Image: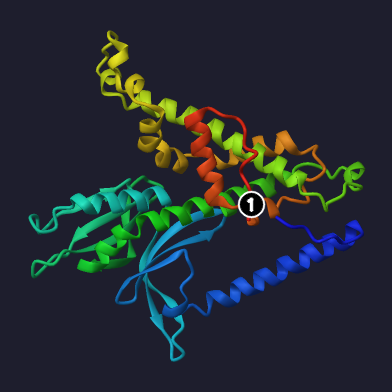
Amino acid sequence: MLFAKVSGNSKRKSEKHGQAAKKLCSNERMEHEISLSSLPKNMVHLEDGLFVAVNTFQKETRVLIRVYSSDDNGFLHPTKEGVSLKPEVWSSVVSSLRTFPALTEPDAVTVVKKDVCIFNQTGNSQMCISLQRLFQRKENSFHLVPERVILRGVQIERLWDSYNRIFTCVKSSLLAYTLKERVNFEIRKYPVDENLDGWDADTPQGFEELRDSLCKCLLDFISRKISVLSKSECIDCKQGFLFNMDVHDCVSFSKKENFVAYYEKTLYNVEWDVLAAKFVKLNIHRPFLRWFQDDLFTEMDTVKFFSKIEEMYLNETPDVRSLHTT
């Protein structure tokens, strides 16, 4: 990561805000200029105007499955035909579709995490389903929202094929948006320490220290959560078998097997508010936290960050010096 040398703290801050404004304008312009030939990496065409995309709204990361229409210039615009899902619900929907009895049970219906319904619309031997969100009223009754989306044949297959790509984008968004928003909120709770204004923002060391600290905070949560999940889902433990603990899945499984089995579920259940509060509390007295509070997330290579999380978990190695940004 490179840092431009600009003299004067106020000048650096002014340029930083200017760059942020330009980036915001650029993002807004791109949102209205999406076409089939220039899809962003967080968006996949499933065929016939249906797309799956990772989106952000009100500090949360969502996965959209939505129909888009094109204007006279070929630019795409979202329609009301679609659903917005939490990442864990999207993951469960994709998994449920693999076993959904579309061809054998004409009236099949599956409710996923009390959040979305899968309805069978299959005809002419081609799998066809509709997704429709549920919402819970104050009296705890559930109702279907009017908007829905229909997926047919190849669209469902491409939804399956897009899973790894969308999951990569989800991880990036959870870090670069969901956590970032919460970290910035936590920082604002602390008064500005004027004694730290003299810090030289042109040095990258502060960025690396914050990145390493964040990596350790997230690793600590993931390690503890995987341990809890491995025990809570162990069949032998559930059945109360207290003998021959060595053959229990929670003990006999390797760290790699546990990571593969529980990592994604763990990531979806991170308490981002708690993680942000812990990270900020650990670093609030470092002069570079406020300066890098945005760059830490926008400049970090999230793919390498999560790869390092896995490596550290498997090897129990606290060293994160090889985690570089691009």
* 117 lies left or right of 231: left
**In the rendered image, the vertical position of residue 108 relative to residue 254, given as above or below:** below
- In the rendered image, residue 223, in percent from the top left (x then y), is placed at 49, 30
Which residue lies under the disc numbered 1?
A: 325
Neighbour class for label 1 at 10 Å: few (<14), some, many (≥20)?
Answer: some
* 281 lies left or right of 265: right
How many labels were placed on the picture?
1
Q: Residue at x 71, y 50 (%)?
A: 293
- In the rendered image, residue 146, in percent from the top left (x then y), is placed at 33, 66
Q: Which is nearer the eye, 220 or 260? A: 260
| Quadrant of the rendered image containing residue 245 | top left
Q: Quadrant of the N terminus?
A: bottom right
Q: Which is nearer the eye, 126 or 320? A: 320
**In the rendered image, the vertical position of residue 86 relative to residue 66, given as above or below:** above
- In the rendered image, residue 307, in percent from the top left (x then y), is placed at 51, 44
The answer to whether any part of residue 147 appears in the image is yes
**In the rendered image, the vertical position of residue 315 relative to residue 101, given as above or below:** above
Q: Quadrant of the C terminus?
A: bottom right
* 153 lies left or right of 196: left
